[in-house]
Amino acid sequence: MSFMGTYQNNVDPKGRVSIPVKYREALGERFFVTKGFDSCIDIYTVEEWEKFAEKLHKLSVTKRDMRDFVRFIFGNATEVELDKQGRILLPAMLRETVGIEKEVIVMGVGNKVEIWDKVAWDERQQAISQHISEISENLGAFDVDFDF
């Protein structure tokens, strides 16, 4: 399953957010959330989380950056479950860390889902839009070819 699309939603006073119906079946009953590399929350299926975790376990414990990276990912991660209304509880620490208050954007980005504070996403999207042609040109350095 490849997650795609963007949905706007609200976080309720208890910190719960509804997951779009389109994503629920693919995510399953339980899945993992953690702080993303940008100011967002990443959501991984159990399968994708296990693949990611396996790669993290292979990192060298003798290098400080690698230890810090593992701390960043696992220290901010938690397993969540959908309630009967299709909502998940976003841990307060994660909401505070990424600045999520009320309005959020829930977005599919391939193998995961991201949750952004709406204002933060609007700003990020504007920055991306201003530089998308430059970004696409730089993809060549990563052997990414989009010739159709």
Image (cartoon, rainbow, N blue to C red):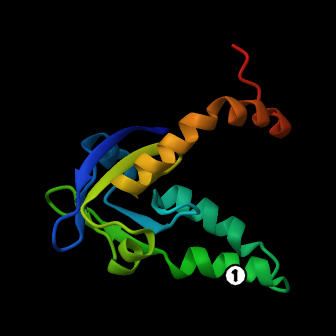
Q: Which residue is mark 1?
A: 68
Q: Nearer the viewer, residue 55 or 40?
A: 40
Q: Position of residue 30 (x, y in %)?
A: 35, 63
At 41% from the left edge and 74% from the top edge, which residue is drawn? 94
At 73% from the left edge and 82% from the top edge, which residue is drawn? 67
Q: Quadrant of residue 52?
A: bottom right
Q: Position of residue 58 (x, y in %)?
A: 77, 72
Asked if residue 65 is positioned above or below residue 103 in the image, the reply reads below
Q: Position of residue 38 (x, y in %)?
A: 55, 60
At 79% from the left edge and 84% from the top edge, which residue is drawn? 64
Asked if residue 62 is positioned above or below residue 44 in the image, the reply reads below
Q: Quadrant of residue 70?
A: bottom right
Asked if residue 61 is positioned above or below residue 26 in the image, the reply reads below
In screen coordinates, is 40 left or right of 63?
left
Dot 1: few (<14), some (14–19), or many (≥20) neighbours within 10 Å? few
Q: Position of residue 110 (x, y in %)?
A: 53, 42
Quadrant containing the C terminus in the rendered view: top right
In screen coordinates, is 52 left or right of 99?
right
Q: Nearer the viewer, residue 3 or 10?
A: 10
Asked if residue 137 is positioned above or below residue 142 in the image, the reply reads above
Which amino acid type corresponds to the residue marked 1 in the rendered image? Answer: Asp
At 16% from the left edge and 71% from the top edge, which residue is drawn? 13
- Secondary element under disc 1, as helix, strand or loop, is helix
Q: Disc count in the image?
A: 1
